[in-house]
Image: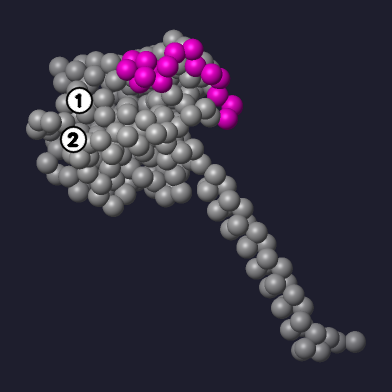
Amino acid sequence: MNKTPMSRRKKWLFAGGILVLILAILVGAFFWYVSDYYRAEDVALEVMSQDSTIEVQNNLTILSPSYPTDTAMIFYPGAKVEAEAYLPLLDQIRQTGVTCILVHMPFHMAIFDANAAEEVIAQFPEYQHWYIAGHSMGGGMASKFASEHPDLMDGLILMGAYIYGDYPDENTLTIYGSLNQSVEDKIDYTENIVEIEGGNHAQFGNYGPQKGDLPATISAEEQQAQTVEAIEAFLAQRDN
């Protein structure tokens, strides 16, 4: 017996209801996942509260040196890490004469705006030399951007990350903690690699222990100080 139009309509309404339910569950699961992220510690937030020269423009936090510079570094945070967690590190980098532009990513995930650097460069034409840096997934997305826009970047700086894409290792600085072996195992190049003895994955930022990360045997302050030293040496080498 042929089904009536009403029975077919009920069938499609039921199928549509199931689809809407599945989509609602997926959307809910996504927002639950991204809402569970690593918050910046007080020591990081204090950098912002104690320094009136730090600028905030939409999704950017800008840390400029106390004197003019023609060099800027765009920074992509690690996945599910509050961007402000990297302020202590960037505050030290700017003291070497580099403007640091911290990008606040959608849902704290650089994968959702890997090309953010392109708009940043267009927004600040006063800088002639551009570097892009990132931690963890942020480093991966920074590497992706650099490999796709090599004409825009003077160099790439990776922290707890490795080159992703086709970007020259001679133009890249790779920094990782000795306790972060998962990164070391993926490095298949030899130039400009700095291993911080006793450092781990998380301590490039100030957001506390990270799940699956080994405890560092040096402080976050020491790991970041060695990071800044390596970056300063790399940039000086690029200037020569």
Up-down relation of residue 35 to residue 73 (above or below): below
Q: Is residue 180 left or right of residue 152?
A: right
Mark before the other along the chain sequence, 2 or 1: 2
Q: In the rendered image, which quarter is residue 164 located in?
A: top left
For the N terminus, which image quadrant?
A: bottom right
Closest to the observer: 54 or 119? Answer: 54
Q: Residue furthest left?
A: 68
Label 1 belongs to which residue? 95
What residue span does the magenta drawing correspond to? 211-226
Closest to the observer: 230 or 192? Answer: 230
Which numbered marker is on residue 217? Answer: none
Q: Position of residue 67 (x, y in %)?
A: 9, 30
Q: Position of residue 193 (x, y in %)?
A: 37, 15
Q: Provide the secondary structure element on which disc 1 rests.
A: loop
Label 2 belongs to which residue? 64
Residue at x 9% of width, y 32% of height: 68
Q: Is residue 210 left or right of residue 4?
A: left
Q: Amino acid at mark 2?
A: Ser
Q: CA distance from mark 2 to mark 1?
A: 8 Å
Closest to the observer: 37 or 5? Answer: 37
Residue at x 55% of width, y 53% of height: 31
Q: Position of residue 120 (x, y in %)?
A: 25, 45
Q: Is residue 13 visible?
A: yes
